[in-house]
Image (cartoon, grey):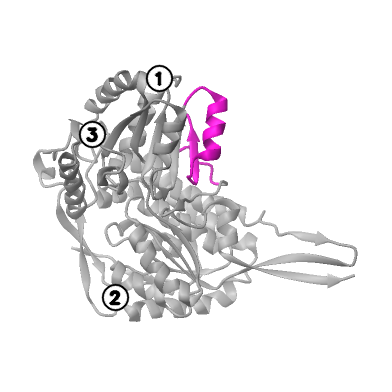
């Protein structure tokens, strides 16, 4: 049984306690490796290594930091097959998804910020009697905590800008999907990243993660995960005056108008509903359809959903793999049962999928489509984070807007219409951090990423990320 190790001070180390956690392969429902159960002592060791490294890393020229980070990006790309197989095994997602999305994006994250920091500029302001300019300085030691749904993709999305800006990092991947973070440790050693610049500690959120958040000298926390966990982190970190970036949950609406490009819209809405088994915070779980095309769209949508193949992640013909864990699968199933109690009609799915052979005990679930639910029911207001969508109809643009905004979340939405004036009106009025028009998950790494309301605080991506991981100092010189 493979034992993963922490990455502290440039070395791979066992947890000081000697305690480990089971790591499951969700496609088979079996333990296949062990994860360090890191505690306060491990986090402190990581902090001390980061603090020591910061003295040098923070003054290393941006070009040199960028060179090392680009080497890491290149190594990720070179080991794409190995990393994709590890991601698929650890998470349950189809191998082809990990190969075409997760691992390439992890490489791009390092490459983007490796070059971006070399073009990052600050402001100056001239007046009649003075000139002001802004210094952007690294914060120090920062904490990065990432989720299980896009493990290496989102882990690097946080780490890369922090390192590029000259900070040193204590990072914790999800204990549910730790494998590619462990493999990244080895790539960092191979790339020559100085010891202590990046430290990766594995463990449980309420233990290891809590120690990172509450550490008195870790000055900023970047977290992606559930809204309730984000609220807990804020309660700890805010009174300590730490900088906070919280990318949290979503209950995203998809607005389909009668004048949409019908065939393309149907295909893309299916993708937006069930990509990564619906385990993406950006998935559109509430599909709002103009009444005049409701029946036509519903039938076309269901026809494509029926063709969605669920099965072993290593099967190149599957569209959906296993859910990430047994607990999460049971949570999703409980919401399907709740939907029935709330008066919903299951149009498709709702059941576990039995995969034969070695995958028989895996956590597979049918893509599930439900209609007939009230907007205010729990199924339509609470984040399920699985392959479950609801269908609702609307008569007017005003009603579509009201239904879309009737949520405590505000992460992302997509609008499907060929009416450019309507698309611009709605973009102004939809209360979401991201509005996609006739597309979904089309990402430019330069753009701000994040949500409103219960979907989080702050923005990631591009200059927003580099601004978060730096502290501004205004310098005023009298002329």
**Labelled disc at residue 15:** 2
The structure residue drawn at horizontal position 52% and vertical position 39%, both measured from the top left corner, is 429
Q: Is residue 389 left or right of residue 247?
A: left
Q: Is residue 445 left or right of residue 396?
A: right
Crowd band around label 3 with a 10 angstrom C-alpha radius: few (<14), some (14–19), many (20+): many
Q: Quadrant of residue 34?
A: bottom left
**Labelled disc at residue 262:** 1
Image depth: mark 3 or mark 2 in front: 3
Range of the magenta residues? 417-445
Helix, strand or loop status at disc 3? strand
Q: Quadrant of residue 340?
A: top left
Crowd band around label 1 with a 10 angstrom C-alpha radius: few (<14), some (14–19), many (20+): some
Q: Residue 107: horizontal and vertical position, in percent?
A: 47, 49
> Who is closer to the viewer here, 402 or 178?
402
Quadrant (top left/top right/bottom left/bottom right) for the N terminus: bottom left
Q: Quadrant of residue 401?
A: top left
Quadrant (top left/top right/bottom left/bottom right) for the C terminus: bottom right
Helix, strand or loop status at disc 2? loop
């Amino acid at each position: 049984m493979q034992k993963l190790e922490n990455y502290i001070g440039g070395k791979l180390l066992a947890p000081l306690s000697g305690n480990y956690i089971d790591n499951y392969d969700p496609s088979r429902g079996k333990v296949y490796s062990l994860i360090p159960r890191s505690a306060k002592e491990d986090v402190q060791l990581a902090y001390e290594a980061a603090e020591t490294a910061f003295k040098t890393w923070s003054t290393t020229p941006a070009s040199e930091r960028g060179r090392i980070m680009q080497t890491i990006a290149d190594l990720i790309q070179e080991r794409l097959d190995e990393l994709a197989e590890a991601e698929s095994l650890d998470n349950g997602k189809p191998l082809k998804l990990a190969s075409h999305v997760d691992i390439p994006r992890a490489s791009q994250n390092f490459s983007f910020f490796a070059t971006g920091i070399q073009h990052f500029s600050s402001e100056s302001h001239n007046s009649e009697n003075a000139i002001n300019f802004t210094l952007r300085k690294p914060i120090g030691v920062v904490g990065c905590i990432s989720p299980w749904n896009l493990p290496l993709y989102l882990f690097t999305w946080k780490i890369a800008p922090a390192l590029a800006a000259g900070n040193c990092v204590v990072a914790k991947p999800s204990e549910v999907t730790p494998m590619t973070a462990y493999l990244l440790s080895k790539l960092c050693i191979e790339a020559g990243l100085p010891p202590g610049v990046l430290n990766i500690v594995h463990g449980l959120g309420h233990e290891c993660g809590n120690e990172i958040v509450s550490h008195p000298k870790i000055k900023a926390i970047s977290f992606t995960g559930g809204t309730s966990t984000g609220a807990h982190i804020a309660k700890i970190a805010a009174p300590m005056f730490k900088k906070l970036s919280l990318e949290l949950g979503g209950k995203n609406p998809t607005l389909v108008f009668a004048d949409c490009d019908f065939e393309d819209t149907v295909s893309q809405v299916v993708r937006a509903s069930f990509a990564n088994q619906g385990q993406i915070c950006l998935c559109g779980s509430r599909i709002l359809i103009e009444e005049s095309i409701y029946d036509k769209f519903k039938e076309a949508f269901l026809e494509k959903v029926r063709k969605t193949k669920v099965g072993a992640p290593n099967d190149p013909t599957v569209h959906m793999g296993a859910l990430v864990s047994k607990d999460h699968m049971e949570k999703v199933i409980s919401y399907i049962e709740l939907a029935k109690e709330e008066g919903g009609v299951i149009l498709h799915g709702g059941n576990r999928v039995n995969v034969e052979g070695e995958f028989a005990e895996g956590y597979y679930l049918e893509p599930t489509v439900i209609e007939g639910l009230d907007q205010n029911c729990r199924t339509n207001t609470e984040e399920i984070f699985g392959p479950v969508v609801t269908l609702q109809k609307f008569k007017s643009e005003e009603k579509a807007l009201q239904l879309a905004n009737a949520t405590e979340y505000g992460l992302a939405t997509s609008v499907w219409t060929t009416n450019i004036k309507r698309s611009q009106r709605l973009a102004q009025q939809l209360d979401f951090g991201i509005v996609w028009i006739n597309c979904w998950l089309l990402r430019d790494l330069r753009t701000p990423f994040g949500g409103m309301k219960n979907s989080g605080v702050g923005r990631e991506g591009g200059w927003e990320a580099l601004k978060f991981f730096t502290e501004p100092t205004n310098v005023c010189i009298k002329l």
